[in-house]
Image: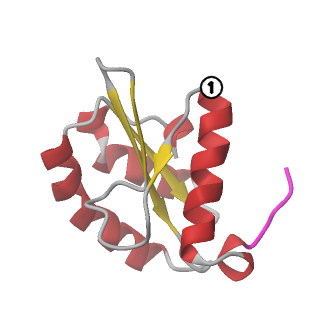
Amino acid sequence: MSNYDFHALLQPLEFEVLVCDVVSQRENVPFRTFKEGRDQGIDGFYTDGKTETVIQVKRYAQQSFKPLIHSLKQDLQKVRKLQPDRYILGISMELTRQQTKDIVELFKEFNVTEHDI
């Protein structure tokens, strides 16, 4: 797989739309995106009337895991309020296997898998 620096290539809103479009194609469902601003932890949203899926997008430069995990810990409170059935994270930086596992552990109550990051 190609390695792109999405932090340098795309503005935040462009990256959010790209992630939501990719996940829409992967999951074969139409995710709704929202205008830029305070999003309450929702960058993409889909519901079939029974279940809700939320996409959150994080655009960080490489080598910025500490700020990323700090931001995700703050977002955990928002996610707990939303109580989605599925939570998907789109992240612009490369992650190590351990970093991915750390994120999965952080969101384990929402059944997040490595496939959702």
Question: Magenta stretch?
Answer: 1-5
Q: Quadrant of residue 115?
A: top right
As for residue 23 lying within the magenta part, the answer is no
As for residue 4 lying within the magenta part, the answer is yes
52 is higher (above) or lower (below) than 66: above
Question: Closer to the camera, 12 or 114?
Answer: 12
56 is higher (above) or lower (below) than 85: below
Residue at coordinates 39% horizontally, 53% vertically from top-left?
102
Residue at coordinates 62% horizontally, 25% vertically from top-left?
28
Name the residue at the front extreme. 35
Question: Closer to the camera, 85 or 62?
Answer: 85
Q: Position of residue 26 (x, y in %)?
A: 66, 32
Question: Closer to the camera, 50 or 3?
Answer: 50
Residue at coordinates 29% horizontally, 17% vertically from top-left?
50
Say left or right for 36 vs 75: right
Q: Main secondary structure of the magenta part?
A: loop
Q: Position of residue 44 (x, y in %)?
A: 45, 49
The kind of residue tagged 1 is: Asn
Name the residue at the right extreme. 2
Residue at coordinates 53% horizontally, 54% vertically from top-left?
90
The residue under label 1 is 28
